[in-house]
Image (tube, grey):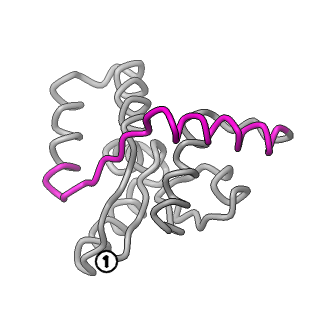
Amino acid sequence: MKKSVFLDTAGIIALFVEQDDAHLAAVKFLKSFMQLGFMLVTTDLVLNETVTWLRYNKVSITDVFQCLHNLYINDLEVIEVGRERFSNALILMHKYEDHCFSMVDASSFIVMKEFKISDVLTKDKDFVVAGFSKLL
């Protein structure tokens, strides 16, 4: 199985919003991942959150479609969270109740553990708290 990297909302935004402070680093990482043959993985909830963020920040729907198209042409693997992972994410949130993990992040942690993914393209420090390597 190929080595995988998880794409979080903050990482996807950094890839496609040139004004983002991590844009250049995110683009550099993506090019490296592609050259090394890494699999890019995310969840349906991350994509939902990303599209919502982009639209709330006045990104045109045409540009949102282009963002998603660019991800999909790079063979992005989208994992559906579904009922069982969602329930496990709630349990994880309860376990870490002293942290304010979002449901999107907690479900991402569940997927990353399940698929043995340790690296995540994100700026979100919660991934470090949960034991993952943050790349931005």
Front residue (pair 44, 88): 88
The relative height of residue 62 versus residue 27 in the rendered view (above or below) is above
Could you say which quadrant of the image residue 80 lies in?
top left
Q: Residue at x 52, y 65 (%)?
A: 135
94 with respect to 86 (left or right): right
Front residue (pair 58, 70): 70
129 with respect to 127 (left or right): right
Residue 95 is one of the magenta-drawn residues: yes
* Crowding near the residue tagged with mark 1, few <14, some 14–19, many ≥20 C-alpha atoms within 10 Å: few
Q: Residue at x 50, y 59 (%)?
A: 114
Residue range of the region highlighted in magenta in the rendering: 71-97
The residue to which callout 1 is attached is: 1
Examine the residues drawn in magenta and state their main secondary structure: helix
Front residue (pair 62, 102): 102
Quarter occupied by the N terminus: bottom left
The relative height of residue 99 versus residue 114 in the rendered view (above or below) is above
Q: Could you tell me residue 94's position as x and y percent? A: 78, 37
The relative height of residue 93 versus residue 120 in the rendered view (above or below) is above
Q: Could you tell me residue 75's position as x and y percent? A: 19, 58
Amino acid type indicated by mark 1: Met
The relative height of residue 74 versus residue 62 in the rendered view (above or below) is below
Q: Residue at x 48, y 32 (%)?
A: 83
Q: Could you tell me residue 55's position as x and y percent? A: 34, 21
Could you say which quadrant of the image residue 134 lies in?
bottom right
Question: In what element is the residue under mark 1?
Answer: loop
Residue at the extreme bottom of the image, as rendered: 36
Q: Residue at x 82, y 38 (%)?
A: 97
